Image (cartoon, rainbow, N blue to C red):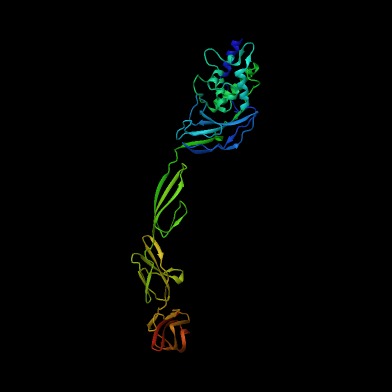
Amino acid sequence: MKKNLQLFLLIFISVPSIYGQGWTTCGTISGTLSGTLTDLSIDSLSPVPNYVTSPSPIGTIPQNEFLIVLHDSLAPDSLGNAIINIKNDGIFNPSSPGLMIGDTVSVVSFSYDIQQWKIFTHALLTNSVPPSTTCCNLLNNTLFWGPCEWMNNFNISDSSDVNTLTDVYVIINALNHSLNFNQMLPPMSLRGLNNVLTNINNNIGTLNTIGCTNGISEFCYAFDSLATNHDQYLIVPSCINTTNTISESSCDTYTWPLNGNTYNLTGTYVDTLINSGGCDSIVTLDLTIINVSDLTTSVSGITISSNNASATYQWLDCDNNNIVIAGETGQSFTATANGNYAVELTENGCVDTSACVAITTVGILENTFGENLLIYPNPTSSDFSIDLGASYENAQVIITDVSGKLINSKSITQSQILNLSIHEPRGIYIVSVQAGDKKAVIRLIKQ
C-alpha cells in the first residue's frame, strides 16, 4: 500500500497539466506594470518597476516579487520565453543574469503567500505518516533523489529557510521533479510556471489528506499573463559620449536650432545634449558671420558715394519707405531733388543698407553763404524757406521766371530763415538772395 501511494504521488506531481487560464488563484489580483520599453545600460541598474495596478493582499503574509524574463529565448519546457532571474524589488544588473547588448527582458510582478509555503515546508520535512514512515520517505525512492533531498541540497531544511520567491522556486521545482543533483534551477517559462503551480494545486489535496501539508490544500498566487503589461528593458551599451561638428555661415546673425541661441560674431560655440543612449552628445558649431564690409558714404554737393568698392548697389528714397530709385545702381548717386537717400549694398551674398543721407542743396546755382545754406522744400507747391546759415541785418530776395520776368522782390531784416511763397503757375523760377557781400542763386521748381 505504501509503495503504491508513493508511486501515485510521483506520477501525479511530475505529469504536466492542461495550461492554466487565469494565472491566478484564491481570487488574487496580480500587479500590473506600465508595459513600456526603456533603454537600460549594460552596466547600470534598472528602475523600480512602475505599478499601474498594485497587487491585492493575499494570505497571512502577502509578498510580491518580480520574475525577469528574456525575450526571444525558449525555456526548456518549450512553452515560451525563459525566466532567467528572480528579484524581490525588480532591480537587477544586466550583467548578473548574463544579458548581452541588444537583449530585451520583461519584469513580471508575482504575488504569493509566503506563509503557506512555510507551513507546507515544515509539514513536508517534519511530519510522519502512520504507521511508520515520514512524508519525505513517502515521496522519495531508492533510484532518484526525492523532493526533500533536493530541497536540502539547496539549503532548505526547515520553514525558517523559506523567505523569498527564490526559495519557493526551489520547492516548486523539487515537487515537479525537474531537478538533478547539484544542478542549478532550470529556467521555466511563465506559462510553464503556471502549469506546474496548477498541477501542484490540482494534486496537493492528496498530500493534505495524509497529513503532509498541515492544512494547505491550495497555494495562492497571481501573475499577469499579458506581455504588454510587463515593464520591458532593451539592453544598450554603457554610456559613450558622442561628438559632432557643424559648420555654418550666415549674414549678420545666426540662430542655432539646437538651442535657440542667436550669435552675431564669428567663432566656435559648443553645446551638450543627451543622446539616445543617455550619454553626452557634444556638438560644436564653427560659425562664420558675414557682414557687408563698409556701409559708410561720402557726400560732395548733391552727390552721395558709397565707400564700399566691393559691393553692388541700389539707391533708395528714404522719404518714401526706402522705395527703389529706378536705374540708380552705381557706386555714386546725384540727387535731382532735396531729400534723404540711402544705398542698399550686396556683398558676399549678404544685403545691408547704409544710413540715410540728407541732400538739401539741389537747385542752388550760386552760393557764397557757405555749406549751411538750405532751401526747402524744393520742389514746392507754394511755400518754401531759405536758411542762410546765419542771421543777417538786411537781405534782398528777388524771384524771377526763367525768362527774367520779375515775380516778386522782398527785403528782410534781422533774419536767418526767410519764409517765402510763390503763387504763380507751375514751372521753374530763379530765386536770388543778396545779403551784404553774400549772394546765392537758386533754381526753384513750382509743382
Q: Position of residue 369 (x, y in %)?
A: 39, 83
Quadrant in which the N terminus is drawn? top right
- Most foreground residue, 259 or 136: 136
Work out which quarter of the rendered image holds the C terminus and state it.
Answer: bottom left
Image location (x, y in percent) of residue 267 = 39, 56
Q: How many marks?
A: 0
Q: Identify whether 51 is placed above or below 393.
A: above
Furthest-left residue in view?
309
Q: Is residue 145 above or below residue 21?
A: above
When asked about the image quadrant of residue 146, the answer is top right
Residue reaching furthest top? 1
Residue 252: x, y in percent?
41, 60
Q: Position of residue 208 (x, y in %)?
A: 64, 18
Compared to residue 321, the image places residue 91 above or below, namely above
Instruction: Classify residue 188 as left or right of residue 252.
Output: right
Give whichever of 213, 302 is nearer the camera. Answer: 213
